[in-house]
Image: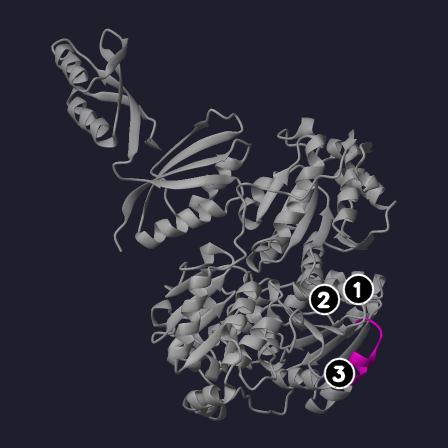
Amino acid sequence: MEKMENRTLTGAQILMEILKSEGVDTIFGYPGGAVIDIYDALSKTDIRHILVRHEQGAVHAADGYSRASGRVGVCLVTSGPGATNTVTGIASAFMDSIPVVVLTGQVPTHLIGNDAFQEVDIVGITRSCTKHNYLVTKAEDLAGTLKEAFYLARSGRPGPVLVDIPKDIARTMVQFTMPEESNLKSYRPTYNPNIKQLQKIISLIEESEKPVIFAGGGVILSKGSKELTEFARKTKIPVTASLMGLGAFPGSDPLWLGMIGMHGTFRANMSVGACDLLIAIGVRFDDRVTGKTDSFAPNAKIVHIDIDPTSIRKNIPVSVPVVGDCRIALDQLNQMTGKADSGNITKKRQKWFNQINRWKITKPLSYKQKETIMPQYVIENLFNMTKGKAIVTTEVGQNQMWAAQYYHFDKPGHFITSGGLGCMGFGLPAAIGAQVACPGELVVDIAGDGSIQMNIQELATAVQYSLPVKVVILNNRYLGMVRQWQELFYDKRYSYTCMDHSPDFVKLAEAYGAVGLRATKPEEVVPVLKKGLNSDKTVIMDFHVEREENVYPMVPAGAPLTEMLLV
Amino acid sequence: MPEEKHVLTMLVDNKPGVLSRVVGLFSGRGFNIESLCVAETIDPLISRITVVTKATESGIEQIEKQLNKLINVIKLRKVSGPKSVQREMALIYVMAKNGQRAEILRIVDIFRGKIIDVGTDHFVIEVTGDEEKISAIINLLKPMGIKKISRTGIIALFR
């Protein structure tokens, strides 16, 4: 390769070389004093820069970009406040294992530690919410560090990696050779699972009468959805998924049980409560999934496949632990299963399927229609009108749970939500990132009136770059999920959850140069959705919904998974 | 589940911030540190950290896994059993009035300690041994009046 020869470049130019070598075509960022040199070099490349309106938005957008495209998301911000503003976004990407590289400017090396203007110790601040982070102290180290950052972000269990680059490093001229692929002796993720462990799974499946597969975000991150679908269909095992796993298995498949957990479907939670074998793949048994851990899947042998050994036996004891890449493990399981005698298995599973079906029929997801707009009704119609093909991002709270329950995902990368951190303000910038990654797709942010206001400024970004993101606000003038808890567990004491003063979202949309639409009656829902979704502009649709509607089923915090409050 | 004492020894990159990652992991995840000892190894690029922690069986499994997950931790082992050697050193500033000085010297001698500083009314004693030995000499010297003490915490190696 001709690029291997030595050249003398500035740190900023070296950064551009590494970005190009990593195939980075888009950066979400916000300029500032400490990154002027980097921005100067950036302007001379073909890399597309999306100017956000707040650095938190830059990280969420890079996160959304990554989830929609399956590639590493990149953002670039300045030192001090630019860097601290990224922390929430980084923490969200960290909890959900999303590969993002965050480049922060830093004050010049000779000023570090002096409380210089716009100086913060961002490496210290983000140590516990990044997969790894670096402060570059020598220009000679820059290229290798950046290569390593990308490698760490995307390999093993992915996650955000931050590189802090002092201003003088970006300006220093130094010999540049493209570093070789990173090879860290202290970092060797296990991709190939132990075959003996997989054989144990096969025998457990043969013995099992009531098996359930529980899929998580790890299946999507390992790009193993196809393999999971094949595995479940071959073995005729019903599938549930965590919030992060939605889309890993087709929501339209007869084997689909719906989501598990605090707001999971009745049949999914009951199935896990009754199963004799739970095959957990790419999950980490979050407390929102398990409920009371002692009574989680009490009758089941639990198999746990995950690439991160710390996930295994952290919250739940397991019978068969398997460390490895979910896709590879599933692929090998499929080979070991061979040709399935589906007639026989179906017969064997019939009793189990009948039981699941009774749960489905007796307690389906449901809500009561009223004179006002029901939030679930909006999402049902959104699902029908988009034929389930939209990329859906969400904010956090009731809007997120209704989206997860009433929009059914057939493909991975189509449901983008802040699962682990539960970060309000995620949906709009994530939708922007997803739309940048997938220009031809319909991208919808399902939002609440509270959370949309946490990063509403990003509307300007969407309009500036003509990104036709659609925002569906389920406007109940409450911080709905907290209000729901107050109603159910705090004797209806609605302490500061009433958000009665919000802007006129239609006028606000127009002020930003977007389209604003409103529906206040049920019969207006379909026309507004139709008009909004058919527009080629950025659109806000403000649905005034029933104010005190609750998300059901609900497992109260700390209760067993099978003890659900129902409609 | 009962908590037990565990000694962990690890080789880590000798780089700024690495100790902070290790210590931060303990505090951030609610694990505890009883003692901690860090220094460069024979390879200047690598340091050895020895940590004593108290944890349940599942707790120590998580601690080991989480430490192994840190990019800068090269190798980690739990130290226990006859194949291991463990030592700690203490510097003890003990009051030594006339009439007690001979007794103190006898104790130091029995424990194979050393007097490294002498004043008109004090000794500074250096003593090395396993944890029980250090605790034992401290108990014996307590009645004389220990003014200050500095313990290194355990360091350990496999034979």
Which residue bears the numbered disc 2? Answer: A431
Q: Earlier in the sequence, mark 1 or mark 2?
A: 2
Q: Is residue B4 above or below residue A504?
A: above
Residue B98, position in %: x, y?
14, 8
Read off the chain for label 3: A
Callout 1 and callout 3 share a chain: yes
Quarter of image, res A424 = bottom right
As measured in the structure, the alpha-carbon distance from the residue carrying label 3 to the one carrying label 2 is: 17 Å
SS under mark 3? helix
Which residue bears the numbered disc 1? Answer: A462
* Magenta-drawn stretch, dominant element (helix, strand or loop): helix
Q: Earlier in the sequence, mark 3 or mark 2?
A: 2
Instruction: Determine contact: label 3, label 2, CB under 8 Å.
Output: no
Is residue A172 found left or right of A258 in the rendered image?
right
Q: Residue at x 43, y 70 (%)?
A: A201
A108 or A208, nearer to the observer: A208
Quarter of image, res A445 = bottom right
Q: As shown in the figure, which amino acid type bears the numbered disc 2?
A: Ala
Is residue B55 found left or right of A226 in the rendered image?
left
A482 or A151, nearer to the observer: A151
Name the colouring of the figure: one colour
Disc ID at residue A529: 3
- Closest to the camera, between mark 1 and mark 2, is 2
Is residue A452 found left or right of A550 in the rendered image?
right
Q: Is residue A157 above or below residue B101?
A: below
Q: Which span is picked out in magenta?
A: A528-538
